Image (cartoon, helix red, strand yellow):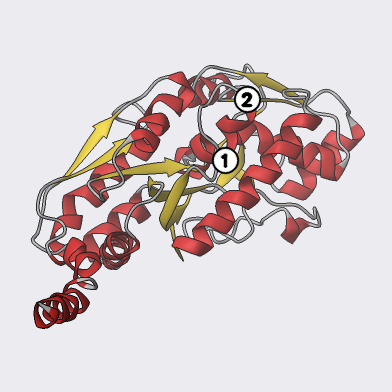
Amino acid sequence: MKKTIKALAWAATLVLPVPLAAQADDYPSRSIEMIVPFAPGGSTDTSARLFASVLGKYLPNNPDVVVVNKPGGATTIGMTAVMNSDPDGYTIGLTSNSPIALQPHFGTATYSWDSFDPVIKLVDIPQVLLVRADAEWETFEEWLDYVKANPGTFTYSTPGNGSTSDLCMSLLAETADIDIRGIPYDSGGKAMAAMLGGNVQGVATFQGNADDAQTRVLVNFASKRSKKHPDVPTLKDVGVDAFKNAFIGIIAPKGTDPEKITILHDAFKQALEDPEIVEALDRQAFDISYEDGPTFGETIKAAYDQNGVLLKRAGLIN
């Protein structure tokens, strides 16, 4: 009897360490869903489909990666779906800074910035101030001199109050101590059309909307110059001590096995070096900007904190 007990105890020491390794050994063994909290067709959705198209070849067992759009609720529906999914590695989310670092401030989201496991940051989405190509200002410095000399006269459009682009302009106005007037529209396309049609004098938007034939980029709100428009200065380049970064990255439900997160991270990191991905991201005016999971988590927290300050200053939250 004693020999039997000893044998069972010895066997247990061999078996106990196995489950954690075994969980990832055959992962992934089926398709992975990538939830996108935006409708099909936009730049974020396009980037999700781009990565999904190549990711399988960098994952063990070459699984399909299926993009599932869950728009609505100002992106909170899709994010909630990610949060509520099983943390088994077969559901991940693609997010920009607005769903994860902005929407939780408004009190309608059931999640916060730290309700997920960050996997990897993929790209930056530079936000810029555009004017028409025939505008009187050739440079940001000329524009700044104008708005300081003519307080309250310069008008600009944004995709809505509290949007990332709107907060970029609020940050600029606060830091540079200028009086400019924002006009919110309900989409980026309408905001751009308003500027091109002469209804407003400028537009705060994603740099991918810049068109050399119709627009002039005055300044980049990010902390570093864009690879797409390297000659366009950042705010700090022109003496305004502020910046606001926007990003796209991958998150997973809280509690996902760290080994599976590592597998996902490594696959996405290899995808960032895929020539097809590099070329396509360049066409879309995204800047590849890799961060590992822990660093991406810090970036999300920093964006969340900054957004809270800007929203309170704008009177959009208490």
**Closer to the camera, 151 or 115?**
115
Question: Residue 221: in sight, yes or no?
Answer: no
- Tag 2: amino acid: Phe
Left/right placement of residue 241 relative to residue 212 reads: right
Estimate the spatial distance between the alpha carbons at disc 1 and disc 2, rounded to whole Å.
11 Å
Question: Residue 105: in sight, yes or no?
Answer: yes
Report the residue marked by disc 2.
106
Left/right placement of residue 32 relative to residue 265 reads: left
Disc 1, SS: helix
Give the residue displayed 57% in from the left and 55% down from the top: 299
Disc 2, SS: helix
Dot 1, how many residues are within 10 Å of its Cα: few (below 14), some (14-19), or many (20+)? many
Q: Say the numbered circle drawn on residue 101.
A: 1
The percent coordinates of residue 60 (x first, y second) are 13, 64
Looking at the picture, does residue 219 appear above or below residue 309? below
**Closer to the camera, 304 or 123?**
304
